[in-house]
Amino acid sequence: MSTTGVSIDVARQLRAICGEAHVVDDPEQLKSSWVFFSPYPTVGVWPGSAEEVAAVIKLANQDGLPIVPSAGSVPQILGHDKQPCMVMSTTRLTEVEHYDHADLTVGVGAGTTVAQLNAMVSADRLMFAGDPPAPGRCTIGGLLATAAQGPLRHGYGAVRDYCIGIRFVTGDGRRAKGGGRVVKNVAGYDLMKLLIGSYGTLAVITSASFKLFPAPGQTRTFLAEFRSAGEALRFRDSVIRSPLSPMCLELVSPGARKLMRPEMTDDAWVICIRAAGSDAVLARYRRELGSAVTRELEGEIESGMWRAIENFPLCPEEGRINEPFPPVRIQINVLPRDVFRVIESLERATWGDAIGVAFVGRVGVGHVLATAWPINSEVPWPPGVMVEELKKGVGDGASVKFEHASNPWPIQPPSLASMRAVKQALDPRNILRGREIF
Amino acid sequence: MRIPAVVDQLRKIAGRDAVLDRPEDLMLYEYDAGVRKCTPVAVVFPQTTAHVSEILRLASLSGFPVVARGAGTGLSGGAISPEGGVTLAFARMNRILEVDAENMRAVVQPGVVNQTLSDNVSHLGLYFAPDPSSQKACTIGGNVAENSGGPHTLMYGVTVNHVTGLTAVLPHGEVVHFGGKAAECSGYDLTGFFVGSEGTLGIVTEIMVKLLRRPERVATLLGIFETIDDGARTVAAITAAGITPAALEMLDGWTLRAVEAACHAGYPLDAGAVLLIELEGLAELVEEQAAAVREVCVQQKAREVRRAKDETERALLWKGRKNAFAALGRLAPSYYSQDGVVPRTRIPAVLHFIGGVAEKYGLCIGNIFHAGDGNLHPLILFDPRDPAQLKLVEAAGAEILERCVSMGGSITGEHGVGLEKRNLMPLLFTEEDLDVMLSLHNAFNAEGVLNPGKLFPTTRMCAETRGRTTNPVLAAEGM
C-alpha cells in the first residue's frame, strides 16, 4: 500500500482503464474533490463508459477494494472502518442514448443531471417528473440509487413508476440491463425496481430510460395556512376526497418555513397545492378549495417557492457537512393516516430545543422528508434519537431512510435475509457499499 | 417419491377434497389461454399460506416441480405445468382480507378475481386500476405473476404500480413478507422485483394493493377512420397534443366487423379502423380534452367521432373491446395472440409489416390493441388440429416480435414470457443480461422447483439451473 492506502499497482491499473486525468489518489486533491465525504476516500475514479465501469469493478474485486458509487452531489458517510476505499463517480456518463420526443421517452447516461435532462426535453414542452433537491447537481444515477423525490411525487408517482429501463454493472463486474425504452414491457425480471433505492449496494447504474410527461401549461399554487398539523392534515383529507387531482400537495412545517424564509416568524403549518390547467379548471380548484386558501401564487413567485421546497434539505447543510455531527436527511414513508404520528415523533425528537428538526411532505401519499441537526453539542447525534421516536410513534413497519449515512436503513428491513440473497447474487464479494448493512 | 405417494401427502396437507389426480379432472388444468398444453400429475387447492409452505417443502424434498395457477387465462403458457409437475390452483384462496378505504388500500388472497375486488369497493367510490380484458375471470395472483396490464394502464400503469406489499413462499417453504401497505418500503424493493417474475422466484399468498378513487367524469369517444394508417397516425398525434387519455385502443376493420357480429357494440361495419378513446378526471378537464381529441381525430381524417351518451353506451363499446378475442372464435377454431410492443410512433410501420406477414404466410391476422402505449395484439387465426398450421403461426408470430424489437420495442407488454416467448428472450437480452437474471433466479429458486422451463431460453435453463445448490446466504439463515 502507498501512503494513500491504495497500492501503486492498483493506481497504475486504474489510470490505464480510465485515463490519467480521471484517477485521483493524492490526499489533498481527494479532499477538494470529495468535500461532501467523511472520511475522505483513498482513491477517486471517474470512468468514461460502462466498459470502464466494469473494468474498474473487476479490478476492485481482484484486490478486495470496496467501492462507493457516487455522483458526488449527495454527502455520504463512508463508515468508520478506515480501510482503503474507492469512490467511483459516474458524472462523465452523460451520453443521450435515445430521445424520442413524440413517444415521450428518453434514455440518458447516469451522470446527466436532472436539470440537464429537463432543459433538453422542455424544448419540446415535455417534463421529467423527478424533482430532487439540487437538480443542478443531482444526477440521474444518484436519483435512482436513492429513490429521491420531490413535490411532483404526489401527482406523477415515484421514479419507480416512470423508469422504463436501466443499464448497470453488477458488483462482480457484469454489464447488464433490465427493461428497455418502451413504456410497457414485462420481458424478464424487473431490475429497475430492484436497483431503484438500493443505494448503490448491488450495482453501479450507468444509464436509464424514462417516460416523460407533457409539461403543464399554466399553473397556480394555492396556499392554506393552519395553526396545527392536525388541522392541516384534515384539509389534506378533504382535498384527497375531492375530485381534484393536483400536481403537488405539500405540507410545510413551521420549522421548514423558517429555514426557507428566515424572515417568517409565525408558526403556521402550510398546505401548498399546485394545479395545472385552463382558466376553467383553475376556477374549479378555487371553488373546491374554498375559503381555506389564503394566498394564490403564479409566475416567478410560484416557481421560486417550489424550488425552495425542492431544495429545502440543503438549507441546514450549507457549510456544516464536514462537522463531526452534520445535518441528516431522512425520508419517511407511511400510510397517509400515519403522517400525523410521524409528525408527533419528529417533534418529540427535538429534545426540547437541543436538536433542530424541520420537514416537508407529500402528505397525500404518506411521504415526509425531514432534516435534523444538532443545536446543542451535549445531546446525541440526531439520527439515533429520531429513529427511536419514529419506532415508538409509528412502529417497526415505517419505512425510514437516511440519505447519506453508511447504512441507509436504520430500522432493519423485515426482508433482510432475502436482501442478503440478492446481494450475494450480484455482489458476492461485497465490493459495493454495504459493509455496514449486511 | 412416486405419484400416488405425492398425492397422499398433498391430501394430508390440504385436505382430502383439495387434490385432483383423475385424468379427466387433470385435463381441465393442462392448458391456459395460449396454445401450449401439458397435464400435471396432480392439482392441489391450498387454503392457507401454511398449506403453500408445506406443499413447497414437500416439493423441494421430493423433487417435483410446482406451478401456481389462478384462473388459467394467461396467454404465454405461464400456468402450464412442467412434465411431472403439480399445479397449485388458488381458487380456494379467494378472500378479500381487508379494505382500508381511508388509506385506499386492500389486502387480498391471490385467488380473488380482478373484477371482484373493484365490485367490492365500488360502494366506497374506489376501484382497482389494472383491468386486463379477462378481468371478469383472471385473478389478482395471476396479475401479480405476469405483471398484467389492460386498456387503462396507459394512464394508471400496470399491476406493479398498484402493488405495495406481498407475502410469498420460497421453494423450501420459507414465508417472507415484502413491503407493506405504505407506498414505499425500507430496503430493496423486493415487492416490485417479485411482481412479474412469473412464479419463478416464490409463490405469492397475500397481496397488498392500492385502490383508486373513481373519477368525477368519464368521456368515451369512438374515432372512426377510413384507413388503418389514419387511425394509427392519430395515436401519436393525440399524445403530441399533450393529452394522456386513460385508455386509447385500436381495432382494425377486419377485427371490428368480427366483433360487431358477435357483440353488437355499435361499431361501424365499413370502417378501416376505429380508436376507442377514454378520458377521465375533473369534469372541466375532461370536456376540454374531449374537444381537443375530437379536433385531432378530424385533423387526422377521422370520418366521424362519436361520444358515448351514457353509461350503457360506454359499457357496450367496452364490451366489444373486451370480448374481441372471444368474438374471433366465430371465425376459426383458435387464435394465437401476440403481445409485442413498439414505440407508439412506429405503429403505422409495424401494422404494415404485420399485413405483409399475413400475406407471406397466408394467414388471417386481426389487430386489436392498446395503441396508446404501443402494445400490439395481432391475433393469428388457425386450426390447432393441424400441426403444420401451428408451426406456421409460431413462425409468423416470431417474425412480428423480431420486428418489434428491431424498432426499439419488446416481445411482451403485459402477457409475460412464459413458455411461449422464452426462446425469443435473446432478441432483447445479451448473454450477460440473462446471466444476471439467472443469478437472481438461483438466489431464490436454484433447484428449479418453482415453474421450471419458463422465462429463460431452454438452453440456459438446462445448463445452469439443474442441480445447483441453494443460495448460500439463504441456506445459512436456515431458509
Image (tube, helix red, strand yellow):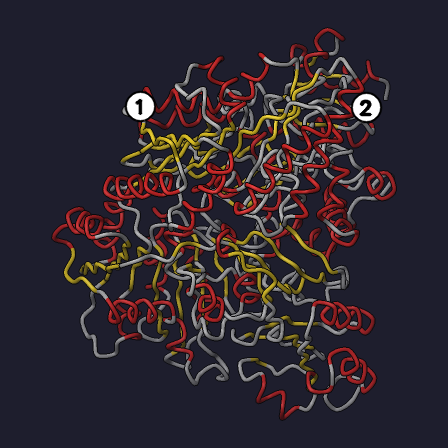
Q: Which residue is mark 2?
A: B83
Q: Is residue B3 above or below residue B477?
A: above
Label 1 Cα crowd, 10 Å radius (few <14 / some 14-19 / many 20+):
few
Residue type, numbered disc 2: Glu
Q: Is residue B324 above or below residue A32?
A: above
Chain under disc 2: B
**Residue B6 picture location, percent across and down:** 79, 19
Q: Tell me the tag on residue B311.
A: 1
**Residue B221 picture location, percent across and down:** 35, 32
Count of number-bearing discs: 2
Residue visible at 75% across and 8% down in the picture: B22
**Residue A321 picture location, percent across and down:** 48, 81
Residue visible at 21% across and 75% down in the picture: A264
Q: Are marks 2 and 1 on the same chain?
A: yes
Label 2 Cα crowd, 10 Å radius (few <14 / some 14-19 / many 20+):
some
Query: Element type at marker 1?
Result: helix
User: Which one is in front in this view, the residue at disc 2 or the one at disc 1?
Assistant: 1
Residue visible at 50% across and 82% down in the picture: A324
Looking at the image, residue A38 sits to the left or right of residue B356; the answer is left
Q: Tell me the tag on residue A353.
A: none
